[in-house]
Amino acid sequence: MTPTAPLKIIAIGGSVRPDNYTMRALRVVVDQLERTEGVEVQLVDPVTIEWPAPGLDGGGPELLAFQEAVRAADGVILASPEYHGSISSVLKRIIENLGYPNGLAGKPVAMLGVAAGVIGAIQTLGQLRGIISHVGGLPLPGAVSVPKVQEVFDEAGNCTDEGMEKFIRGLADGLVRYLRDPIPSRASSS
């Protein structure tokens, strides 16, 4: 029996604010993936890459390495704060910098949204689902929305809500399950 290649997952944050809640939540997902056997995960902090406006040259070697990593990935996680009822401009620019055809095309994409409000990032996740579909990605069900995010994480970045942490970690588990068995096996009932 030949060994199976590890699953390659890239997790992309959608905020450049210092010490932002989006990256705090995404780090919980990444931690869960790092604990999962047979998974390699790469966390992308958007502060580390120059994101040129669409149609303009720029970006340099970091952008090219990022594009290559997304194309080589088995699955992608996109995380965004909810800004004015939509995804962040940072995440939109990241998606636009994945070229044409878009690097998300054909990729299973898990979605994570955070918001200060009580209803969470519901609008953000809905719009993100539409964008992913439009560029040919496969948005997975089970997106995670973290409401009142400022009450869920402490100053050190730790999740202080056990139930929410389990929910966030479940995003990682759901993506891995999908990647390992996109059409779940059904036990025959005899």
Image (cartoon, helix red, strand yellow):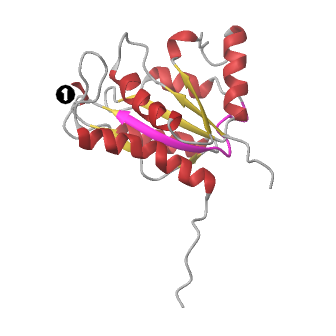
- 12 or 30, nearer to the observer: 30
Residue found at x 53% / y 47%: 175
Name which quarter of the figure residue 44 lies in.
top right
**Residue 64 among those drawn in magenta:** no
* Residue named by callout 1: 151
| Vertical placement of residue 154 versus 52, above or below | below
Which of the two residues, 162 or 24, is positioned nearer the viewer here? 162
How many numbered marks appear? 1
Q: Is residue 3 left or right of residue 80?
A: right
Q: Looking at this view, is 11 or 31 the one in front?
A: 31
Q: Is residue 111 magenta?
A: yes
- Residue neighbourhood size for the residue with mark 1, other residues' Cα within 10 Å, grouped as few (<14), some (14–19), many (≥20): few
Q: Which residues are magenta?
A: 100-113
Element at label 1: helix
Rendered-image quadrant of the N terminus:
bottom right
In this rendering, the answer to whether 183 lies above or below 5 is: below
Task: Please determine whether, in this image, residue 149 is positioned above or below residue 56.
Answer: below
Could you tell whether 67 is left or right of 118 in the image? right
Residue under the point 66% across and 31% down: 70
For image coordinates 43% across by 27% down, the residue present is 27
What amino acid type should be assigned to the residue bearing mark 1? Glu
